[in-house]
Amino acid sequence: MKKSMIAVGCCSMMLAGFFSCNRVQDVATDLLISDEEEIKLGRQYKAQIEADDDEYPLYTAKTGYSDDVVDYIDSIGQNIARHQDDRDIEFTFTVIDNDSVVNAFAVPGGFVYIYTGLIKSARNEAEIAGVLAHEIGHITNRHGAKQMVKQYGIDLLLDVLVGDSSAIRTVMDISSGLLFLNYSRENEFQADSCSVEYLVKTGYNPSGMKTFLEFLADMGGGTAPKLLQFLSTHPPTDERITAVARIIGRKSSDVRSRSIPDVKYTP
């Protein structure tokens, strides 16, 4: 029994260490879907998402919304995007007006969404930056695009790109819950690792990623309502916290002692 537990623990540590933020390309996916094609698919999902006022109410459609909040989130996201050199595409950052959802997600092609519930729950700017950097990591590693190829097949995706109405209805059905966001444990470890690296490059204290994961774990982990994909059970949150702490621990003392901005605009 003890040997089995030790083996499982060692396996988790090896996985966390192996899936770093090195850009390991999936050759088949890169050959089958170009950046331009992925962005085109992403734009179609973006249009579908932003047309669904019930499921994805945009913060900017809210009466009396604050430009400060919109500009704040965009400035953090764009700053991180500029400091990563894994992928040269345009990123957009959009706020969804739902205080009961503590979540963020990324659509292939450079489109990142963050809920007001997450913005309000984060204790400081470093935690918000950690979440946005995590989602950027999913995009730079093309996790969503690879899931789309796996889920739908390249032929169906190419039919969407040429305007086949039947294929568009099948692939663009967001009522299914954006199934391409069902990332693997390896994807989540890699996005977490990218978050730390991108935060360091941008000038943040990378502990923001760790403390936000700890906050979510304290809320009840995957059993807490409305936490959705950001607390994927693959891998469990405690494994993600351990892996992120290990990566941060390898950074210099100067990086680990960086100040954490207290400023935060509240929706």
Image: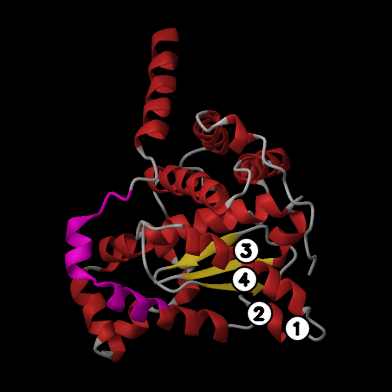
Q: Considering only vertical position in the picture, is 190 above or below 168?
A: above
The residue tagged 4 is 74
The magenta segment: 23-42
The residue tagged 3 is 76
Query: Which residue lies at the image location 38% right of the left edge and 43% below the top edge?
Result: 186
Q: Residue 262 at what x, y percent from top left? A: 79, 52
Q: Earlier in the sequence, mark 2 or mark 3?
A: 2
Query: Which residue lies at the image location 76% right of the left edge and 74% below the top edge?
Result: 68
Horizontally, residue 150 falls left or right of residue 206, namely left
Q: Earlier in the sequence, mark 4 or mark 2?
A: 2
* Front one among 234 and 70: 70
* Contact flag, marks 2 and 1 (Cβ < 8 Å): yes
The residue tagged 1 is 62
- Residue flagged by tag 3: what amino acid is it? Ile
The residue tagged 2 is 58
The quadrant of the rendering that contains the C terminus is: bottom right
- Secondary element under disc 3, as helix, strand or loop, is helix
Membership of 17 in magenta stretch: no
